[in-house]
Image: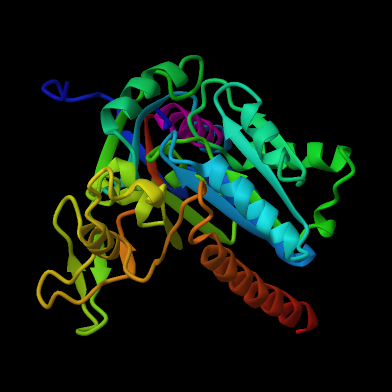
Amino acid sequence: MHETSIASFLVEQASAAAEANGIRRVTKVTIRVGELSGVVQEALRFAWDIVTEATPCAGAALVIEDVPVTVRCPKEGTIKRLASPPRFRCPDCGEPTPELVTGRELELKSLEWDE
Amino acid sequence: MNSEAPVTQPRILEVRTQILKKNDELARAMRAEFRAKGVYVINVVSSPGAGKTELLTRVLRELRARGLRVAAVVGDLATENDADRLGASGAPARQIVTGTVCHLEADMVARSLEGLALDGWALGDLDVLFIENVGNLVCPASFDLGEECRWLLFPCTEGEDKPLKYPTLINTVDVVVLSKMDIAQAVGFARTTALENIASMRPGASVFETSAKTGAGVDALVDDLVRRRDAFRGASIASARA
């Protein structure tokens, strides 16, 4: 259950960004979560409600955007999307694909608030 | 909800930062310090009971026998047993008790290293430092500890399909160690399938087969470590001169 740790890091950062921009009450926090980030979304949402208490993010909706796993095929040089759960081979030619392009994201994208 | 048009207009602030930025930044600073001081750091991950401590105790002994200065810090939810076991190798070892936290974070390691310093062990006096993570195949994946190399232990007792079940963690490691191989036959371990599975989840990872009980395979693993550490040392010296 490292989602509690991740939620704590997130609320700390989101609240700092809110305060730096004079936002008193955040209504929505949007994050990008890669399929390989190891985050269980339900656990993150559960933790979110707890860690946001008494912060500018209290009551804010948590919007999670999924980022798929993509790799570069070393043979073709092009970016390929992998199935879920992934096997690190080019889905077209079968070549091993050590280079991950996306999928590990764990990113605070944006905050929303009402004027 | 949105059925009634809000009177106020929502405003958006684009932030675009890593959620674990604080951990990542500390880990980066630690890595820079490890490099500057020539300490090769290995983060060892596995499920609980995979044999990390047993294997590391052997590896620490072997490295000491080869004249390298080594130390270890070890994370567990509770008890200081593992630091005591690692300490039996003669290397300094410190326990990190995480309480309820199921993985190590960079600041926990930084604090533990301060403790090591209080015991009279300066980072600059070390050649290799092991960080034995909390036994967990999920949570440690996201937390950079400033290491140069990540080892993953898979005991043959966990079955050949285990690599497929934890894509997140396995895709971050440099070395996979198949451990407890002395009982592979007894547990019907399908070695070839396991190797294929590892290659399909982490193409390019080095794979070693060991038994901490008999010592089989430990030499080859240590040889690889020493090779990586020599290359690291060469690169550190080159960048210091540049």
**Residue A4 drawn in magenta:** yes
- Residue at image x 51%, y 26%? B101
Q: Nearer the viewer, residue A100 or B73?
A: B73
- Residue at image x 59%, y 48%? B56
> Can residue B5 be seen?
yes
Q: How is the image coloured?
A: rainbow
Q: Main secondary structure of the magenta part?
A: helix
- Residue at image x 48%, y 46%? B45
Q: Nearer the viewer, residue A113 or B219?
A: B219
Q: Quadrant of residue B224?
A: bottom right
Q: Nearer the viewer, residue A114 or A43?
A: A43
Image side of residue A32 versus residue A20, left or right:
left
In the rendered image, residue B34, in percent from the top left (x then y), is placed at 72, 59
Q: Quadrant of residue B219?
A: bottom right
Q: Quadrant of residue B59?
A: bottom right
Is residue B231 depicted above or below B192 in this figure? below
In the rendered image, residue B157, in percent from the top left (x then y), is placed at 32, 42
Q: Nearer the viewer, residue B242 or A33?
A: B242
User: The C terminus of chain A lies in which quarter of the figure?
Assistant: top left
Extent of the magenta region: A3-16
